[in-house]
Image: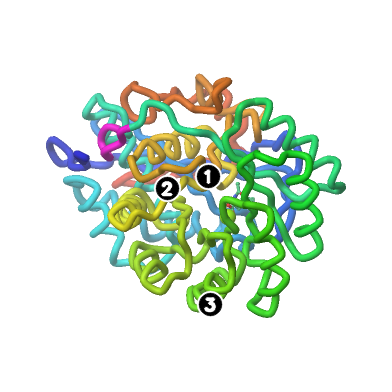
Amino acid sequence: MSRDLSAASPLRIEAVEIRRIRLPLTEPFETSFGSVDSRLIVLVRLEAEGLEGWGEIVAGEQPLYSYETVGTALHVVRDFFAPALLRAPLSGLDDLGLRLDAFRGHPMARAGLELAFVDLLARAAGRPISALIGGTRERIPAGVSLGIQPRIADLLDRIERYVSLGYRRIKLKIKPGWDLDVVADARRRFPSVPLSVDANAAYTLADADHLRGLDRFGLMMIEQPLEHDDLVDHAQLQRSLETTICLDESIVSARAARQALDMGACGIVNIKVGRVGGYSEALAIHDTCLSRGIPVWCGGMLESGVGRAHNVALASLPGFTLPGDISASRRYFARDIIAPEVVVDANGTVEVPRGAGLGFEVDRDYVEGATEAVERFTTRKATVAVT
Ligand code: NPQ
Ligand code: MG
């Protein structure tokens, strides 16, 4: 696997632009921590030497999935990360990492800048991002995450829809009161569909007996049953469960991944660039898991096309052996901000683009129309526009 994330010659970042756009969801998305019906997307755009690079900050509007929010991300980019990037030319992704390592936390904000920078590097090299990071797949298997529904019948309809569209794995969001009965009905109706469940930290060790009730459904995995910041209890739970635990929220770094695997806290890892702070940490987690034979898959954060395109590039790496939460743009949005939009073919796969950078065009006019505010930072000055 070859990887090349250095610039041919140091890149001077001339501008950092952060933009908020609101995209309505085609239907509400409910998890154990709440429901959303639109997504406030934060796009990052870097300019250097006549080129641009696009990234996305996947933080939510409220600190529910993690402590970050759109507000905290804007603050740290504006006051700390953008000035650090603008200070001096960058020789590559490692250099960017070192520059931002001075600051603690805020992985989603950090990742937004890393994503945009890697797109910039790839465009400068005239190569797709997947090639720069060592991707080996031409197509990746798609999966879908289905939110908690008002009625089980509504969920069964959606499972049927995505199975008939060819999706390779269906993930059901669960919480206390929406778990065993729901999974039992889904399994009865779809005996051989690859199914998994995601609790988003809705249970405790006191629920271990209850969670063992899931073992009879042949699930691929149970994702993040316990607290977001816990590994030890997950290791204990895993010892009493047949179903493989997959960790999402708890895997905040390559170190956390190594420790989780060492203590047997999970047997599968969900990788999200936003949660772990960008490509370098995501690549390190991938490499650790690959060397230990632990399958990984790419998670999703209801991204716009920009974040989705980065996910497709990441999932082209050899260790991404399971279908993840990469779905078609249409799963979430009536209209996406990239062209072409991400599509899933009849075999349930998504093509890894071969064009330079993200391999998709950002639809400038549509983005402008959906923009709530833009802030632009250069070495000279900062400008703010609110529409
Ligand atoms: C997960 N995503 O795997 C996340 C959680 C998630 C596709 O299941 C707004 C912002 C709403 C972030 C809903 C999927 C969200 C969000 C769910 C993240 O746990
Ligand atoms: Mg999850």
Q: Which quadrant of the structure image shows residue 135?
A: top left
Q: Amino acid at mark 1?
A: Val
Q: Is residue 158 magenta?
A: no
Note whether 178 is above or below 36 in the view shown: below
- Which tag, 1 or 2, sits closer to the chain's start? 1
Q: Residues within 10 Å of mark 1 (few under 14, many from 20)?
A: many
Q: Is residue 135 magenta?
A: yes
Note whether 357 is above or below 273 in the view shown: above
Q: Secondary structure at mark 1?
A: strand
Residue 271 place in picture, x, y as percent? 44, 52
- Which tag, 3 or 2, sits closer to the chain's start? 2
Query: Position of 189 compared to 313: left or right?
Result: right
Residue 85 place in picture, x, y as percent? 29, 51
Q: Secondary structure at mark 2?
A: helix
Instruction: From the image, state whether disc 3 or disc 2 is nearer to you.
Output: 3
Q: Secondary structure at mark 3?
A: helix
Q: Mark 1 to mark 2: distance in Å?
A: 8 Å
Note whether 232 is above or below 335 in the view shown: below
Mark 3, residue position: 236
Is label 3 within 8 A of ligand 2 (CB to nearest ligand atom)? no
Labelled pair 1, 3 in contact (Cβ < 8 Å): no
The answer to whether one can see residue 84 in this image is no
Part of the protein shown in magenta: 131-136
**Residue 342 numbered mark, or none:** none
Q: Mark 3 to mark 2: distance in Å?
A: 35 Å
In the rendered image, the quadrant that contains the N terminus is top left
Q: Which quadrant of the structure image shows residue 277?
A: bottom left
Mark 2, residue position: 112
Mark 1, residue position: 42
- Which tag, 1 or 3, sits closer to the chain's start? 1
Instruction: From the image, state whether disc 1 or disc 3 is nearer to you.
Output: 3
